[in-house]
Amino acid sequence: MFRIFISILTLCASTSLWAQQTSELTLAQAIDYALKSKADAQKARLEIKKSEYKIQEARANALPTIAGSAGMSYNPKLQATYIDASTFAMPGMPPGVLPDEPIKMEMGQKWNSNAELKLTQVIFNQAVFIGLKAARTTREFYLINEQLTQNGIIEKVAQAYWQVYQGQQALENIQANRTLTEKTAEVVEGSFKAGLAKKIDLDRVTVALNNLKSAEQQASSRLALAKHALKYLMGMPITEPISLPKDAFKADFRLAFEKGDASNRVEIKALEKQKELLSLSAQATRGSLYPSLALQATYGYLRMGPKIPLFYGKKDKVYGSDYSSIGLGLKIPIFSGFGSRAKVQQALIEIETIEQTLKDTRLAMDLAQENAQTQLANNLLTIQTQEENVKLAQEVLTNTQNNYQQGLASLNDLLESERALSDAKNSYTNALLSYKLAEIDLLKAQGRLDVLKN
């Protein structure tokens, strides 16, 4: 029994430790979970897998193809032809031996069966070869698209993560303020019972405490909704409990002064790959105007006779023979009604459109980077200011508490200083949130969202 008891305690301790480890969710863990579980990430991986089969499909057009066929037919009425009887006349044959009218002859047999194998090998086809290259480029595009999808997931998860953290900090601030007000309420209530405080003071502190309880409930609800949004973006079950570490909300002030290269953005690479695909599409259309050459080889076996060839042989006048052929097929396009030329021109216009999009996208990214750095610099000053405000509000509260105990400050002053400290803490938390969101925007503009995974 003692061993069983120890085993149960060990199991409970392990379960508790596991719960503590899994409940503390860092940003890197949240991103890693999302990249593995979110449907968008899984669909992007499926597209890459699908592109592998597209390459195989394009490659198949350049490989030899072998096709087999077989068939059997019955001819109730054989086709007849008429032959001039004089064709059969021999030199010196007396007149009147052959009829004057044509001779009717039936061609073929009642039953026919055949089996055939045909091999076809493309020797030259410009469109096929370009199609193979386009398939490989398409796979590269899907790889870039996966990165683009991952960046979108990272951005959304990081934003939701800091929203949860801000909500968690706001709730803790309200709870801390409520604790202070509860202590104040106990003092006022004791003074009222001793006849040293007025009823209005007790009512005032009770109203303040009730307001804090209501604010705490609202903050708790907002935090729950923010957690639900984060878990949805992660692809995590909504019922899964999570909490964030208390020391994760830190600002990396170095980012505000770092310059990045927007050309590393995945969006730029995706547009450039689209441009390459359009160029290959135009080349493939031009390739259809080139001659194509293919090798064909055929081997077959034919049986025919008055009875079913599958069951009868020579004694039933059913005969068979094999045949084969090898040849080259040359196809030369001559006129297609200018349709191919129109397709090429459309592809060229789309390429020019991509060029303009690339130009505008680069400008937009440069603008986003400059704006994000400016925002970071402004938020950095705001954080420093709010951090100082928190220290000052704490000092004011401490002095007001001392003065209240000595009768030098009113209850209203004490409650106001408690509320001022809570507001200062919330302003500091909001400033940190603004900084972290601007930090995400800057990393996105620099094409460096991957650093959030570490």
Image (tube, helix red, strand yellow):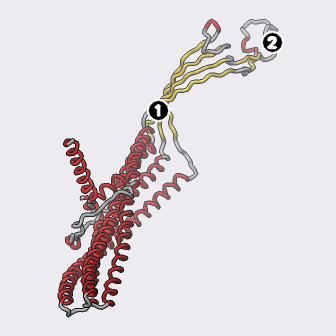
Is residue 229 visible to the viewer in this orientation of the structure? Answer: yes
Q: Is residue 264 left or right of residue 347?
A: left
The answer to which image quadrant residue 153 occupies is bottom left
Element type where label 1 sits in the image:
strand
Vertical arrangement, residue 251 with respect to residue 85, above or below: below
Element type where label 2 sits in the image:
loop
Q: Is residue 294 left or right of residue 48?
A: right
Check the image and name the residue furthest to the bottom.
Answer: 408
Residue 212 percent coordinates (x, y): 33, 78
Residue nearest the observer in this picture, 339 or 164? 164
Q: Quadrant of the N terminus?
A: top left
Q: What amino acid type should be assigned to the residue bearing mark 2?
A: Pro
Residue 269 percent coordinates (x, y): 34, 59
Check the image and name the residue furthest to the front.
Answer: 194
Q: Are marks 1 and 2 in contact (CB under 8 Å)?
A: no
Residue 181 percent coordinates (x, y): 27, 80
Residue nearest the observer in this picture, 88 or 353? 353
Whole-Å distance between the Cαs marked 1 and 2? 54 Å
Is residue 431 visible to the viewer in this orientation of the structure? Answer: no
Q: Quadrant of the C terminus?
A: bottom left
Residue at position x 79%, y 7% in the image? 97
Within 10 Å of the Cα at label 1, are there few (<14), some (14-19), or many (20+) other Cα atoms?
A: few
**Residue ID for mark 2:** 99
First in residue order: circle 1 vs circle 2: 1
- Residue 398 bears which disc, if any? none
Within 10 Å of the Cα at label 2, are there few (<14), some (14-19), or many (20+) other Cα atoms?
A: few
Q: What amino acid type should be assigned to the residue bearing mark 1?
A: Thr
**Residue ID for mark 1:** 65
Front disc: 1 or 2: 1
